[in-house]
Amino acid sequence: MQDNPYKGYRPPALDKLKECGARVWSDVEMETTGGVFSGIILPRAETADAEHIVLKMRTGYNIGIRADRIVSMTVRGVKEAHYRIPEQEFPYDDSNPNVTLLGTGGTIASRLDYRTGAVIPAFTPGELYGAVPELADVCNLHTEKLFGIFSENMGPKQYIALAEAIGREIEKGVAGIMIGHGTDTMHHTAAALSYMVQDSPVPIVMVGSQRSSDRPSSDAAFNLRSAAYAAAHGEIAEVMVCMFGPTSDSYNLLHRGTRVRKMHSSYRSTFRTIGDIPLATVTPDSLRPLREGVYRKRAGRAVRIVPAFEEKVTMVYYYPNMKPDIIDSLVDNGYRGIVIAGTGLGHVNRPLYDALRRAHDRGVALYMTVQTLWGFVQMYVYETGREIMDLGVVPCDNMLPEAAYIKLGWALGQTDDLDEVKKIMLTSVAGEITEREPHDGYLVLQGGLPEVQDFLKNHMM
Amino acid sequence: MSHDRIYRSLGFRSGLEVHQQLATKRKLFCRCPVGLNNGEPDARVTRHMRPTLSELGEYDGTALMEFKTRKTVVYELLRDSMCTYEIDDTPPFRINQRAVEYAIEIALLFHCNLVDEIHITRKQYLDGSIPAGFQRTAVVGLGGWIPFRGREIGIRQVNLEEDSCREVRDEGHQIIWRTDRLSTPLVEVITEPDLETPEEVSAVNALIGRILRSSGKVRRGIGSARQDINVSITGGTRVEIKGVFRTSYGEALTANEAKRQRALLEVRNELYRRGITTETFEASSVDVTPIFAGGEEDLLPEGFVPGPAVRVVRLNGWHDLLATTTQPGRVFAHELAGRVRVIACLDAMPNLVHSDNPRVFGLTDEIWRTIRHAATATKEDGLVIVWGVARDVETACAEIIDRAREATVGVPNETRQALPGGLNRFERILPGPDRMYPDTDSPPTAISREMVERIAAALPEPLWEVEERLRKLGVSEWEARDLALSPWRDVFEKAASGGLLPVKRLAMILTGHRRAARRAGIAFDSIPPGEMERALELLGRRTLLWPGFVALLVRLADAVRAGNGEEERAGIDGIVKSDRLTPAMGEEIDMLVNTMMKGWTGGIGVDIDAAHRALTGEVVYALGPRADGAAIAKKIGERLRGMR
Ligand SMILES: [Zn+2]
């Protein structure tokens, strides 16, 4: 922080600061052509323009003053503050289960730098205890920070490192594992871990927040507490995502890692189970299963970790009028696997046929999913589907496109033998393919209908 | 005034924060329409607010207090007046540019220095009034002033911010809010603490309101303007009183708050005399549930149902202080009760009983002896009994002890809520600047010089200059204020300079009579200015008399209300003619007088004056709006004299 005394400033604002002997965190009084302003100079956002200087006033408000209006500046001192998370030792209670929180870089708990608005993550057990002391009611917490990256930068290296870390924790005998993760690609990571960590004897719960924890209405603490309960006391030993059920903070849902998807860019209740019902509801002090057929918590520390991933795998979201050169260029660039999100029951247009045949002949693994998200690929129904299968494209049943993409990377990471890959792809490891779609696995209530309005009126949404 | 001297001797200081909604169609950070919606909610959402860590690595005082209350916050959602932004499920959209322009205009009206770049700041609130847990607010102008009684009142800041939710109900551990008002753009005008008496507070409040209205950019109606008053006296602390809807209470509110602060300082002094300081303060609480539960029921007064848990707080050395008067009809114990109500959610009043007013609920001496014994209290101590759910009762005891300890310092930093009649009660601890931080969801918005120049060029004439000019024309103070903000200001000034009617009469028509007409349901303000000017001219030339003039205005207003276009309307001269509004003259009056007096012989003993009045009245009645009373009276007078 003290590395750059002019953080974010460029000329002309930068020149003005230097000319006046001021810097970031200087306590100044500015005389301008439009009055006198005083406060502390704040760092400037890199993306903001170069004309203005940001002041934090004594009242707590920030304002921007144009550098070319400043006549003179009196520097009264420097008021730099470093914000730290208050740390308190996380209490250990013999009767509580041990839970490990693995960190990937998403901030679940944090505190705020009140001057810049920057968020300082809380991560160690002591920091987390300072921010969410209720955690100590349900578990003895241990934390390990694996990486510090945004969720969009998660990739194969991180999936593998996470899977291996989970293996180590299970061997140590923890009762459950939480993984703090940014929400954008949480479902990709959830799918990867579902394949890479098999037969886990303990719950593996992914958790994040849609509203950062610096705001009083954040979902972070509720998510973290619910996830801790699911990890410490839950009976479901699967890779799961634990996030808001409704937008009210009344309960969370546990979603199976291969069937979950982020469905809204900003809602709290953005994660939904697709093509099935969620596994359970969970709150900071209770868990209610919603269905049978889950992997239950077991004694013992045996787990199978299958860490592998081929990076030259891609996903193509088909659209009408797609040209064959899209497929050709992927093949020419050495891609070994392509997951297509096709229309309807799993279709693409005829002009792609030759390109797909060529890809198949070159040994590229081709798999079909549906961009409708809900429902099965059914390539026998129409002539088109049968033709596309003849080209060597393999239908993925009701695997979600992202779950299929991750799985193909994982399969090709294990073997070059395309028949073996096909066997891996079509054998459900963690519920990514279901035999039956329940009648209530597709419920997208439409607002405006009288019966839906009744539901909304009488239940917390 | 001697009152003023008293306030000056107390070191009374007050400042105002006036919140005024802007007349934009849409909200500040989303595209929802502005307006209240009283329909059945379409859905509800429930949330809980959690304090965030502040600068010192501790929770902010307000935040902590509100967290202690453990309230479930419920939002009522109405499709037509909210979207996902209002429930904090969508980040803000770009700030409403129209609102920015209005705020700049208002900042200029208050002579503020404008900032060059607007930075949205988040101001934390944990009471649930804003679903995000913070209000988005921004400074637009600083360091302004307004003229007041020959001096300047400083305007510290003009902010542009989003309005909060409307409270529906606050009961126990649940508070319900309606999201329709949320995010309505408003300006907040903050004065320096330059006001020296309660009377000045209400006068300046009214002045600020009028200046805001002079912009023509603000919403009108109930709830569109809200005032907070900051009050302190020497030795006291700044206390903010919120929700001063009715300015008529403003004066009493500030006066009562000054009295309350003085009383609190006296309590502190008395505590010092008794050797009780912040360091030596001692208090404790003990569970007395068994005394009230079972066995000794016959001890309990009828109708008193404490419980399920009862505790008593012992305040060492506090005897008699709990009954110290703080505001009219209020005592120090109300300070404790306020904290207990808000923080422990024990809101069925009265929520405590104390030893300085032991007879409440008819508690007997015997019960008090038992309690005093349980609390190991002496006669020198003060006792406070609270009851309710065990967890809340414990919170209540801790709060009572905290508040009593604060009495050793004097006046706690509080936000207080205005009550009808000029009293106030505790609302929350006054938050500090630590609850302000930059809104990372919104980019800064530069205010271009072109925009400022354009707004400045179209700025309305300063209100006080208009009022001054009107007063110089000879109208009263009240009429000057009315006319300055009136749609009839231009018509008035034009007619006044024309000299056809005396200024006072003109002012009376366009202020007092206008009000009366509107109260009577006449759409006075819908009369086109040109027609009003012509009507005034006819009145001035005595082509119309007062009754005819009034009849004409009613006709004009009705025509506009009926939606008749300019061409369809007969025009003033047409109406005057067709409705025969011009006064009856010479022969016409003669004929009527003749008819009325036919067969009238007079005679001895007849009261001539009474006859004069009666006959005049009959003729005036018969002529209606065309009657020129003076001319008729004169004519009848001549006839009567002739018959004598
Ligand atoms: Zn909206």
Image (tube, coloured by chain):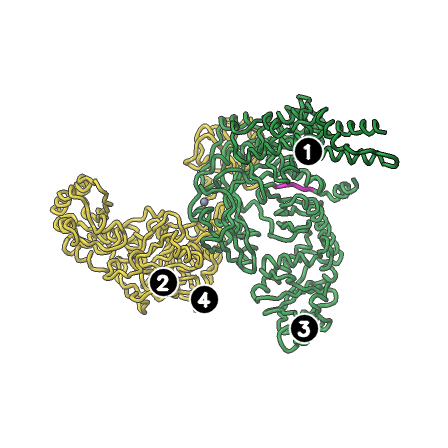
Chain colours: A yellow, B green
The amino acid pointed to by label 3 is Leu
| Residue B235 visible somewhere in the drawing | no
Query: Residues in magenta?
Result: B13-17
Quarter assignment of residue B634 = top right
Which of labels 3 and 4 is toward the front? Answer: 3
Number of other residues with Cα within 10 Å of mark 1, as a class: few under 14, some 14 to 19, many 20 or more? some
Q: CA distance from mark 2 to mark 4?
A: 27 Å
Q: Is residue B531 above or below residue B75?
A: above
Q: Is residue A76 magenta?
A: no
Q: CA distance from mark 3 to mark 4?
A: 45 Å
Q: Label 2, on which residue?
A: A280
Label annotation for residue B300:
3
Identify residue for label 1. B624
Mark 3, mark 1: which one is toward the viewer? 1
Asked whether the residues under the numbered discs 3 and 1 touch, taking CB atoms below 8 Å apart as contact, a structural biologist would say: no
Q: Secondary structure at mark 4?
A: loop
Secondary element at image label 1: helix
Q: Residue at x 31, y 62 (%)?
A: A238
Say if B356 sits above or below B88 in the image: below
- Total marks shown come to 4
Q: x and y percent of residue A42 in the render?
A: 49, 38
Chain under callout 3: B
Q: Which residue is mark 4?
A: A93
